[in-house]
Amino acid sequence: MNTKLLEGKTALITGANRGIGKAIALKFAFHGAQIAFSDIAYNEEATILENELTTFGIRARGYASDASSFSDSEQLVTKVLEDFPVIDILVNNAGITRDNLLLRMTEEDWDRVINVNLKSVFNLTKAIQKVMIKQRFGSIINMSSVVGIEGNSGQSNYAASKAGIIGFTKSMAQELGSRNIRCNAIAPGFIETEMTARIPLEYREKWIQDIPMKRPGTTDDVANLALFLASDLSAYITGQAITVCGGLHT
């Protein structure tokens, strides 16, 4: 039995230089996928990740691309297809936070979060759908959040962007399902990343106490679900928003 679940497939992952995106790239590479990944800049982190991925015996290449830019996203897909024969899997993972109470939130902070988190999903899905329709295969995985389901004080921009991703995901599942293209969302809860490490300790401890499993999640917990959704094990699953939260959302 072949234990490499993504052997022969190619994945494009946005926002992959660190955190959840990096964990997904490493997990996919371990399971035999060729990896194209992007971030806002091609820097030392990208070079390190590229080298790390190739140790699994697969092809890997990083690209500098602004996922919030429609033209950048189109150009990214074009460049990836010059280097790889197909794109079987798209992981829309690019995301930022600009937290504040609405009373103090600026228009710039609202627009930036919506553009990076939500518009990027439109941009990349729009750019890649013709490719997947032509090959009559594809798995699109969009990174949402438990905050997009339940909301969170001080994160109205982030919650709106992540809730929008769920609605977009369900709509794309209906539009593309007849072409054998699946579209699902992952909604992580409290996951240990560089982003959550910046949260004050008192808030971190309160969140952990609210989690039935009494621990934060790891990036590997999220990557395992992404692997399932990218692989043929989930061939009849589409239009779903699946939480990875230790029971925080029920």
Image (cartoon, rainbow, N blue to C red):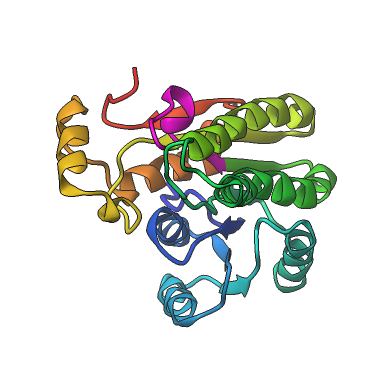
- Count of picture labels: 0
Please give the name of the residue rendered at 78% of the width and 41% of the height, measured from the top-left corner: 136
User: Residue at the spot x=54%, y=54% of the render?
Assistant: 94
Residue farthest along the front direction in this orientation? 103
Q: For this view, does 61 lie left or right of residue 119? A: left
Residue 60 to residue 99: above or below: below
Residue 180 appears at what percent x and percent y?
A: 73, 34
Please provide percent x and percent y for residue 216. 22, 41
Image quadrant where one finds the C terminus = top left
Residue at 42% in and 45% down: 99
Q: Position of residue 93 (x, y in %)?
A: 53, 51
Reply above or below: 117 against 232: below
Q: Is residue 107 left or right of residue 49?
A: right
Q: Nearer the viewer, residue 242 or 166?
A: 166
Write down the region rendered in magenta: 142-154
Res. 231 visible in picture:
no
- Give percent across and percent down for residue 56: 42, 70
Q: Residue furthest top?
A: 250
Residue 206 seen by the camera: yes
User: Is residue 18 one of those drawn in magenta?
Assistant: no
The relative height of residue 250 versus residue 242 in the rendered view (above or below) is: above
Residue 158 lies, with reference to residue 38, above or below; the image says above
Q: Residue at x 68, y 46 (%)?
A: 119
Nearer-the-camera pick, 106 or 18: 106
